[in-house]
Image (cartoon, rainbow, N blue to C red):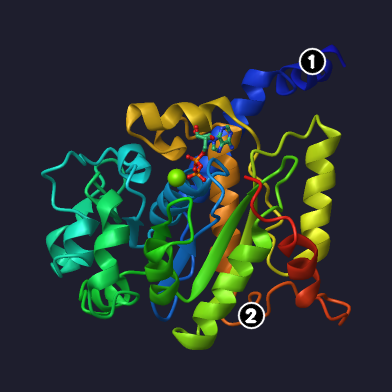
Amino acid sequence: MQDSETVDQIDDTPIARAAQAAVQAIGRAGEGLPRPAATRVIVVANQKGGVGKTTTTVNMAASLAMHGLRVLVVDLDPQGNASTALGIDHHAEVPSIYDVLVEGKPLADVVQPVHDVEGLFCVPATIDLAGAEIELVSLVARESRLQRAIAAYEQPLDYILIDCPPSLGLLTVNALVAGQEVMIPIQCEYYALEGLGQLLRNVELVRAHLNPALHVSTILLTMYDARTRLAAQVAEEVRTHFQREVLSTAIPRSVRISEAPSYGQTVLTYDPGSTGALSYLEAARELALRAVGQSGSTVGQQRDGQPGHGAPMAQYGTTEGHQ
Ligand code: ADP
Ligand code: MG
């Protein structure tokens, strides 16, 4: 009697829970995930800054790679945060996505392996990219330069994740033309849905004119703080409007997630047993297990057959501009 009580108590300590999570995380990391029939090119976009685009890109990519898949991260933000988080040098002289977009260099010439994670690769961004938004304007096929570079890349890949800058300019348009899927991280806080209408309209424009395959396949709730009622309200609102697209795993607010980049690491290698690591592994598993083509081909469609398509756009389209 006393023994089992003691065991129960031990199991319930934070350290025991962390250890359990670590075992679970490591165990799951070893398991395979289905290899997509063709490379899934996923654009991680939201023109709001600080919502978790970069964090989601690098941690989802690392999670997929740790399941045995071959994954390329394309850093498309001049700040180069994804490059930093993956421990990839990106000072001004490093061959980068700028050379690909503006100079027409092959992607293969700028891809670098990520040290800690087998099967994970990165195309870094340097500060040069800050000028690309303007330089691209006068170039031929200015919207499809990334798409062409990816099409010409011959190494086999299961996933390409593109980390977009916090704007809807030509860099983001290049990403939207290059990808089939858009993943939108949404931070569970007030104003979370502002500007979403504008992003959805841009996706729609690119789909109509430049890339018929493009669709919002995935929405991920980030920095979820289970203690606040606001986070729960935002999550519920997003889930109501985007039933098919929202992953059931929400990423919790986690100090370990925010610390990892300063060590040039993803949370998956920095602290594999943390709840942050575990939640990204789960989110990546969900993403990988969603059959391509079934997942959210219609933006905002409601499960009960209500005309959901226009609803979120109409509702949130009016609140643009406040960021
Ligand atoms: P974006 O790329 O959209 O600008 P980031 O991924 O850079 O956003 O995230 C913004 C900030 O929030 C960063 O400092 C990052 O470390 C932190 N952050 C992101 N996700 C989490 C999380 N789940 N818990 C705690 N901090 C987070
Ligand atoms: Mg970023």
Tag 1–tag 2 contact (CB < 8 Å)? no
Per the model, the C-alpha gap separating discs 1 and 2 is 54 Å
Splitting the image into 4 quarters, where does residue 110 fall? bottom left
Closer to viewer: mark 1 or mark 2: 2
User: Could one spot residue 212 in this view of the protein?
Assistant: no
Residue 33 x, y percent position in the rendering: 49, 64
Q: In the displayed structure, does residue 123 sit left or right of residue 274?
A: left
Residue occupying the point 32% across, 47% down: 78
Residue occupying the point 83% across, 17% down: 5
Q: Is residue 206 above or below residue 185?
A: below
Splitting the image into 4 quarters, where does residue 18 fall? top right
In the drawing, what numbered circle is on residue 297? 2
Residue occupying the point 45% across, 51% down: 57
Q: Quadrant of the N terminus?
A: top right
Q: Mark 2: which amino acid? A: Ser
Give the SS element for disc 2.
loop
Splitting the image into 4 quarters, where does residue 157 fall? bottom left
Q: Where is mark 1, residue-wise?
A: 3
Give the SS element for disc 1.
helix
User: Could one spot residue 47 in this view of the protein?
Assistant: yes
